Amino acid sequence: MTGTTTPRTLATTQTSFEIIELLRERGGGRVTELAEELDLAPSTVHSHLATLIEAGYLTKEGDLYQLGLGFLELGECVRTRKESYAIAESYTEQLAAETNSRAVFAVEEHGRGVYVYTFSGDHAVWTYSTVGKRFPLHVTAAGKSILSQLPDARIEEIIDLHGLEPKTDNTITSRNVLLEELTTIDKQSYAINREEQLDGVKAVGVPVSGPDGQVLGAFSVASPAHRMKGKWFEDELPDIILAIANEFELNISLT
């Protein structure tokens, strides 16, 4: 079922994006499948698909429609629209190499986290951190790092908007508990993900801010839980990420 619109939005544009999102989720789709899921007339769906193909954003193989490479150019443009984002790439790669783990740089947009860069070290583990993927801020080290630097009113707004959905048994689902942890993160300058997004995976994250003092995003490192323990997890890893974060902040302050 398509979403509702407000007086200042266009229903046709919203429908096009709902079709795009559904194609992304399904990895492709046919007119009748899309029409049924969106509760639209097949002729309406076909018109939107034809328009998107003509614009270069979809492809068609037989009767199967898929997202086209036109989105790839847009995605890269978005990722590099801020110079600080472009600078973060090399630091994320360096972080993965130094820790032999999966390292990411993530930002907040519309109350969700978005992975901008992700690199894998020798002992990297699979996580949900694919480039461009959105994620709940409260379930990751990077997300909690970012939340810890936002104004209280913005934090409350994000919680009200998206809730605190559990991803594992360890996910923080209490507003008060999350707010207490964010205070701790702010004081110690790093966050810990204790298998809160994915069972068997722990992570450490550090927020980074721009010259204006506003949070830009966060670096984080994830690894299997059996590696994330003892002095390495509690002291050495946070220090490594903090050093990278500090160097990054110094670099962008000079640009």
Image (cartoon, rainbow, N blue to C red):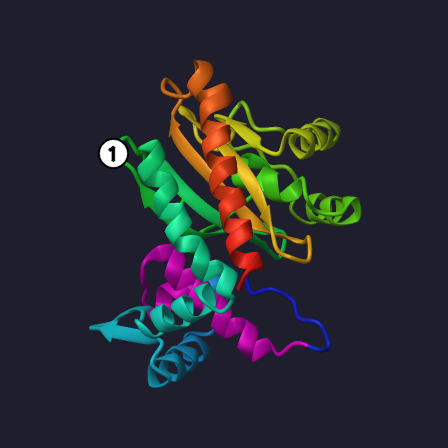
Residue at point 25%, 34% (across, down): 122
Query: What x and y, as percent, mark residue 140?
Result: 52, 36
Question: Relative to residue 92, is residue 226 depicted above or below?
Answer: above
Q: Quadrant of residue 45?
A: bottom left
The kind of secondary structure the magenta stretch mainly shows is: helix
Please give the count of numbered marks on the rendered protein: 1
Query: What x and y, as percent, mark residue 50?
Result: 36, 82
Is 188 positioned to the left or the right of 34 in the image? right
Residue at point 47%, 42% (across, down): 244
Question: Relative to residue 244, is residue 9 depicted above or below?
Answer: below
Question: Relative to residue 253, is residue 218 depicted above or below?
Answer: above
User: Considering depth in this image, is 17 or 159 the residue closer to the camera?
Assistant: 159
Q: Is residue 23 magenta?
A: yes
Is 152 positioned to the left or the right of 33 in the image? right
Disc 1 marks which amino acid? Asp
Q: Quadrant of residue 70?
A: bottom left
Residue at point 34%, 86% (across, down): 54
- Residue under circle 1? 122
Q: Is residue 63 magenta?
A: no
Q: Secondary structure at mark 1?
A: loop
Is 108 positioned to the left or the right of 41 in the image? right
- Stretch in magenta: 9-37
Question: Relative to residue 178, is residue 34 depicted above or below?
Answer: below
Query: What x and y, as percent, mark residue 132?
Result: 43, 56
Residue at point 60%, 64% (across, down): 3
Is residue 131 visible to the viewer in this orientation of the structure?
A: no
Residue occupying the far left of the picture: 62
Would you call the spot at circle 1 few (<14 residues within 10 Å), some (14-19), or many (20 or more)? few
